Image (spheres, grey):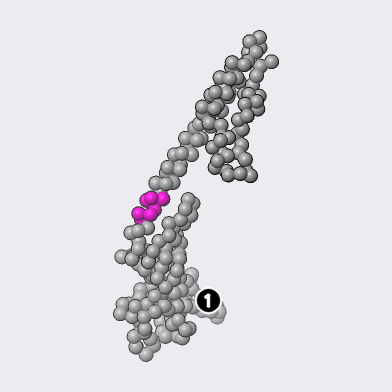
Amino acid sequence: MATNLNEVLANSGVSTTGNTKKNTTESTDKNALGKDAFLQLLVTQMQHQNPLDPQDNSEFVSQLAQFSSLEGIQTLNQSVNGITSAMGSSQALQASSLVGRSVIVQNDKAMIDPSKSLNGQVVVPQNIDNGKITIKDKDGNVVKTIDLGAQNKGNADFIWDGTNDKGEKVAAGNYSFSATTTVDGKAQQMYTLLPATVTSVTVAGAGGEMMLNLAGIGKVGISKVQTIGI
């Protein structure tokens, strides 16, 4: 009777699966069926075939085709790993250039330097007749109210000069912003887009998102960044 590759594999002691109870990497290295082992088993199969009932050539061709497909997949995996590594390096370089720069993110807090004006935006969900921004200090005290007036759907710009309702300069620190409007007699909250300075960047692993560490805010995914300034 002809000897097939599966029988040779069974008698050779070579396994295509690792021992999941032990060290995974070590088991994979010892038990994985590589190119050399495959060819050796194929030659052994040919040597031990029954001369009176030789192995069908089509089965050899099928096995070689399977091996070729496996080798192609392994090569593809190596290429993908190389591309992933290159993308990680590129991401790290891009990340380093963001440190110290200002970005605009969807957030309700901002670190204020009263010597500079703050330029922000409010996301208006629909045309409104009126709207306002309430700014509070770290203790929750209202320091400034900005009237937006009527606005069309979209992003409405606003500027805060760093003064309170009395016209006095506020202290530097972290302030919260709340934008509201009235729709059909009901109060409705609106999102604010505020500037923040990137203090550091956390480069994620494969498949992860790069995180920006923003002054006075904390970590924010780079996908949430609306604009990158200087």
- For the residue marked with disc 1, what is the amino acid? Gln
- Relative to 203, is 100 above or below? below
- Relative to 82, is 155 above or below? below
In the image, the segment drawn in magenta is: 88-94
Type of secondary structure dominating the magenta stretch: helix
Residue at x 45% of width, y 85% of height:
142
- Whether residue 222 is visible to the viewer of this picture, yes or no, is no
Which residue occupies the foreground of this view, 34 or 178? 34
Locate the N terminus by quadrant.
Answer: top right
Direction bottom: furthest residue: 166
Measured as percent of width and height from the top left, residue 164 is found at 38, 86
Magenta stretch contains residue 171:
no
The picture quadrant where one finds residue 59 is top right
Direction top: furthest residue: 52
Is residue 25 toward the left or the right of residue 79 in the image? right
Element assignment for label 1: strand
Residue at x 47% of width, y 35% of height:
75
The picture quadrant where one finds residue 168 is bottom left
Measured as percent of width and height from the top left, residue 90 is found at 37, 51
Residue at x 42% of width, y 46% of height:
85
Measured as percent of width and height from the top left, residue 99 is found at 35, 63
The picture quadrant where one finds residue 148 is bottom left
Q: Mark 1 sits on what residue?
A: 188
Measured as percent of width and height from the top left, residue 191 is found at 47, 71
Which residue occupies the foreground of this view, 20 or 56? 20
